[in-house]
Amino acid sequence: MQTKSSKRLRFIVVNGIIMALYLVLSILVQPVSSGPIQLRISESLNHVVVFNRKLMWGVFGGVVVYNLIWGYGAMDALFGGTQTLLSLGLTALIYHQVKNVKLRLFINTLAFTASMALIALMLNMTGGEAFWATYGTLAASEFIIMGLSAPLMYYVNKRVQFEKRA
């Protein structure tokens, strides 16, 4: 039987691992990890919340730290963190209402795709990027990464069992 402090430590460690994975995967593809076209393979980790709502904090932390250090700084960390927290929060909210995991993966993909409007707004405000064109490229690239990674994360979960990890 786990004590309260060992459960808390496990929660922190597992979220720390998710955060580190997010950072490593973002840095690996750094030339295309920021800007109007983003092909961050680390965005596949957004799907862990479909399996375990407690893992959202590792993804959120990874986004904020990456955007702050390697992205566009504080504004990117604020907008990217908000976009991530809103999307992950939505998926966490529907966790018990939508029992079908594949449907939750699809909803999560749509939530992240739609919420890229916040990133397009940030790029419009800070760099003068055209909002709709930027939103189009961001939404398309997010949909591709999230769509391709959803089946992969479904099968990774079968092996790793995210629901038991935090």
Image (cartoon, rainbow, N blue to C red):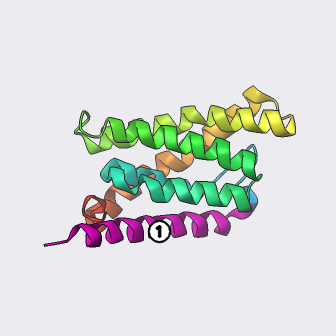
Determine if the magenta segment contains residue 61: no
Residue shown at the point (57%, 40%) measured from the top left: 83
What x and y, as percent, mark residue 90?
41, 36
The crowd level at tag 1 (other Cα within 10 Å; few <14, some 14-19, many 20+) is: some
Direction from residue 21 to residue 161 in the image, left or right = left
Residue under pointer 1: 16
Residue shown at the point (54%, 44%) measured from the top left: 84
Task: Return the residue found at the far left.
Answer: 1
Task: Using the image as rendered, state which of residue 145 and residue 57 is in the foreground.
Answer: 57
Task: Using the image as rendered, state which of residue 29 and residue 72 is in the foreground.
Answer: 72
What x and y, as percent, mark residue 145?
54, 50
Task: Using the image as rendered, state which of residue 37 and residue 76 is in the foreground.
Answer: 76
Residue shown at the point (30%, 68%) measured from the top left: 160
Main SS of the magenta segment? helix
Residue 116 lies, with reference to residue 41, above or below; the image says above
Q: Amino acid at mark 1?
A: Gly
Secondary structure at numbered mark 1? helix
Q: Which residues are magenta?
A: 1-30
Task: Return the residue found at the far right.
Answer: 128
The picture quadrant where one finds residue 108 is top left
Residue shown at the point (18%, 72%) measured from the top left: 2
Residue 39 lies, with reference to residue 129, above or below; the image says below
What x and y, as percent, mark residue 19?
51, 64
Residue 83 lies, with reference to residue 31, above or below; the image says above
What x and y, as percent, mark residue 60?
52, 53
Task: Give the quadrant of the N terminus.
Answer: bottom left
Determine if the magenta segment contains residue 29: yes
Direction from residue 145 to residue 149 in the image, left or right = left
